Amino acid sequence: MNFLAKVRPLATRSTRRTGTPTAALTFTRAMQIQSIPMWTGGHDNYAYLVIDDKSKDAFIVDPANPEEVTPVLKQAIQDGKINLTAIVNTHHHWDHSGGNDKIRSDLGTPSLPIIGGRNCQSVTKTPADGEAWKLGDIAVKGFYTPCHTQDSICWFLQDGNDKAVFTGDTLFHGGCGRFFEGSAEEMHTALNKTLSSLPDDTKVYPGHEYTKSNVKFGVSVLQNEAIKKLESFAENNKETQGKFTIGDEKLHNVFMRVDDPVIQKATGRTDPIEVMAQLRTMKNNFK
């Protein structure tokens, strides 16, 4: 299998024109995001390679299946395209952080930093909630979003006007993660306070390709134009990661619309936390 062919270039910083109108044009890029699909047709995970083009500094998000990720990283390193500075995890589940040790071994970098929640495999650093750090020129902040797991962290990146958030199993396009280690109140806080506070133009990069199944449930509860648009996109595209923003999620994700009278009617609840809990129960039982 040609693993390199599976890398999906998803986002680069918009080219910028510099100098006067009569001067030669100079184009620069700084933030690049590539997705690496893993276990396609099974768990449908994504790892993400984030690169600061200026410095070539890079980190890899949730490289859980080294068989599919290591060849991509080795090729990029050998070609001089990246300086891999860290593994970054969204939470401790095996299909997100379970490849950390093998990635280090495969690359011959046993001291490669692992940044993530406290229970992630071989984690070396857990930043404080909202603590700022840098990948080259890219500003990075990790926001604690406990519920799916208690060590869940969503990673917000900004480079100029470009913004991205890696949400693991907390937020999916049109859905959210199960409440394995938390409560409806915690997921309500994660989605409708923490993530909702990010700029609306922040692109969302979830941990799995679950959009098609999420939207099937969503349209059973809500039939607005935004969710119909999501449904159409999911039907016509196998991959949806990075194609929708926080602003989009506020319009088409039922778990981020707990104050919507239509959704309150569908759940038979009006309290936002009770609406969240009932939505999750309904989704868990949806066929």
Image (cartoon, rainbow, N blue to C red):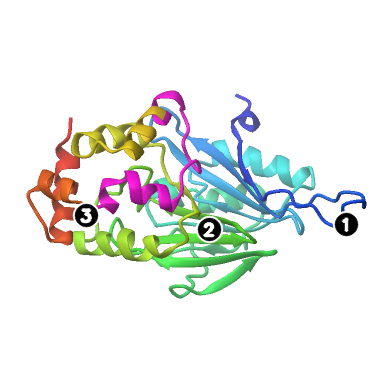
Q: Residues within 10 Å of mark 2 (few under 14, many from 20)?
A: many
Callout in the foreground (3, 2) = 3
SS state under label 2: strand
Q: What amino acid is found at the position of numbered circle 2 in the picture?
A: Val
Q: CA distance from mark 3 to mark 1?
A: 50 Å
**Magenta stretch, residue numbers:** 233-257
Relative image position of residue 162 (x, y in whole percent)? 60, 55
Q: Is residue 251 magenta?
A: yes
The disc label shown at residue 258, or none: 3
Q: For the residues carrying marks 1 and 2, which lies nearer the camera in this image? A: 1
143 and 261: which is toward the camera: 261
Label 3 and label 2: CA atoms lie apart by 31 Å
Residue type, mark 1 in image: Thr
Question: Which residue position holds label 1?
Answer: 20
Q: Above or below — where is 194 with respect to 169?
A: below
Residue 109 occupies quadrant: bottom right
Q: Pointer 2: what residue?
A: 88
Which is nearer the eye, 66 or 238?
A: 238
Q: Left or right? Give the position of 273 relative to 147.
A: left
Of callouts 3 and 2, which one flags the residue occurring earlier in the amino acid sequence?
2
Mark 3 lies on a secondary structure that is: loop
- Depth check: give the residue in front, 21 or 125: 21
Picture residue at 43% right of the left edge, 67% below the top: 143
Residue 256: image location, x then y, percent: 29, 53
